[in-house]
């Protein structure tokens, strides 16, 4: 039996400290060499909010790919927005206008411009009954702006480090694994996770699991470009997964995004349009 001397004990203690330090350094340094710190959740939330883009008006053009019912469609998307007020979206395909939407905090309107011309004047509850997805104005605006969807500053999030990112979540990592492995746990309704890029402190991904109904919403942002002191994602995507289908849209923005130039939001219903007929299934 080896007798432990004071020197031996000190040597073992030093080796343990070095191993722990080395291990922590490996886990908390990104592939690009950025050292990640254990920030509390309120610091990360503040960083996200402070990095939200600021504008009075926004105008952008993009190419988008829509995946729905096992079909893939390529469309062009033009967006005009006035912050916290109104969003105008025009969809076209092969230079032919398909749909124009006008979105406000309490209403959604659209003009269907191909085939039989139709118009729709409704609210978010009506839209949910049509497409089965619960929407609101801030969710749409935050996605367009590249912000964290559904981030609630009143929630006590758990902060951690996940690979090369900071992570805000509603539960600790061990609990998250259990929740995702068991879709039958209806005691928990929502699992929220937001990954933050440690280089620019912008949201890079949000995953919202609606556990009680087994639905998931995922938004991702990348390829950031600085425009008038704002970091704006040139690529974004949003995916909605339910028990029946998966709906997603991938967007690649043109680089000529315009900020703060006053805009109009044309939306005119003439006699060529008839009401869009909706059949609600109660």
Image (spheres, rainbow, N blue to C red):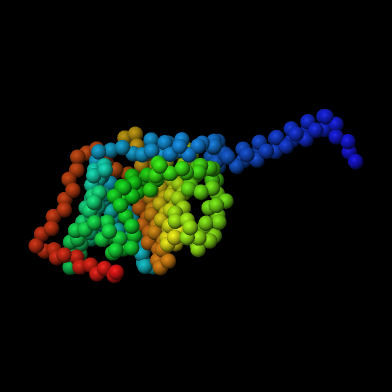
Residue 269 in percent (x, y) is at 13, 58
Q: In this picture, is 171 found above or below 95?
A: above
- The residue depicted at 47 percent of the width and 44 percent of the height is 157
Q: In this picture, is 104 found above or below 262?
A: below
Residue 7 in percent (x, y) is at 82, 29
Left or right side of 201 for 94: left
The C terminus lies in which quarter of the figure?
A: bottom left
196 or 138: nearer the viewer = 138
Q: How many marks?
A: 0
The answer to whether residue 62 of the structure is visible from this angle is no
- The residue depicted at 36 percent of the width and 64 percent of the height is 68
Q: Residue furthest right?
A: 1
- The residue depicted at 52 percent of the width and 56 percent of the height is 179
80 or 37: nearer the viewer = 37
Left or right side of 82 for 71: right
Q: Residue furthest top?
A: 7
Q: Residue furthest left?
A: 271
**Residue 17 figure quarter:** top right
Left or right side of 217 for 127: left
Left or right side of 141 for 28: right
Q: In this picture, is 98 found above or below 3?
A: below
Residue 12 in percent (x, y) is at 78, 35
- The residue depicted at 34 percent of the width and 34 percent of the height is 229
The answer to whether residue 264 of the structure is visible from this angle is yes
Q: In this picture, is 69 found above or below 266?
A: below
227 or 103: nearer the viewer = 103
The N terminus lies in which quarter of the figure?
A: top right
Residue 254 in percent (x, y) is at 32, 47
């Amino acid at each position: 039996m080896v007798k432990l001397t004071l020197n031996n004990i000190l040597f073992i203690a030093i080796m343990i400290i070095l191993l722990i330090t080395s291990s922590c350094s490996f886990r908390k340094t990104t592939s690009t060499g950025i050292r990640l710190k254990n920030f509390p959740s309120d610091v990360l939330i503040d960083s996200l909010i402070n990095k939200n883009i600021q504008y009075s008006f926004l105008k952008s053009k993009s190419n988008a790919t829509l995946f729905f019912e096992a079909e893939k469609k390529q469309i062009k998307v033009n967006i005009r927005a006035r912050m916290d007020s109104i969003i105008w979206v025009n969809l076209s395909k092969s230079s032919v206008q398909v749909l124009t939407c006008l979105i406000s905090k309490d209403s959604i309107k659209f003009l269907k411009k191909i085939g039989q011309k139709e118009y729709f004047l409704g609210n978010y509850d009506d839209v949910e009954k049509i497409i089965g997805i619960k929407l609101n104005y801030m969710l749409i605006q935050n996605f367009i702006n590249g912000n964290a969807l559904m981030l609630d500053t009143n929630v006590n999030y758990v902060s951690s480090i996940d690979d090369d990112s900071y992570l805000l979540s509603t539960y600790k990592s061990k609990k998250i694994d259990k929740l995702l492995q068991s879709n039958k746990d209806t005691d928990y309704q929502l699992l929220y996770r937001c990954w933050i890029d440690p280089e620019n402190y912008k949201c890079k991904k949000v995953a919202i699991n609606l556990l009680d109904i087994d639905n998931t919403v995922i938004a991702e942002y990348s390829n950031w470009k600085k425009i008038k002191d704002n970091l704006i994602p040139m690529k974004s995507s949003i995916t909605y997964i339910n028990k029946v289908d998966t709906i997603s849209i991938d967007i690649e923005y043109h680089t000529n995004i315009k900020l703060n130039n006053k805009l109009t939001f044309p939306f005119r219903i003439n006699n060529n349009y008839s009401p869009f007929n909706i059949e609600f299934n109660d």
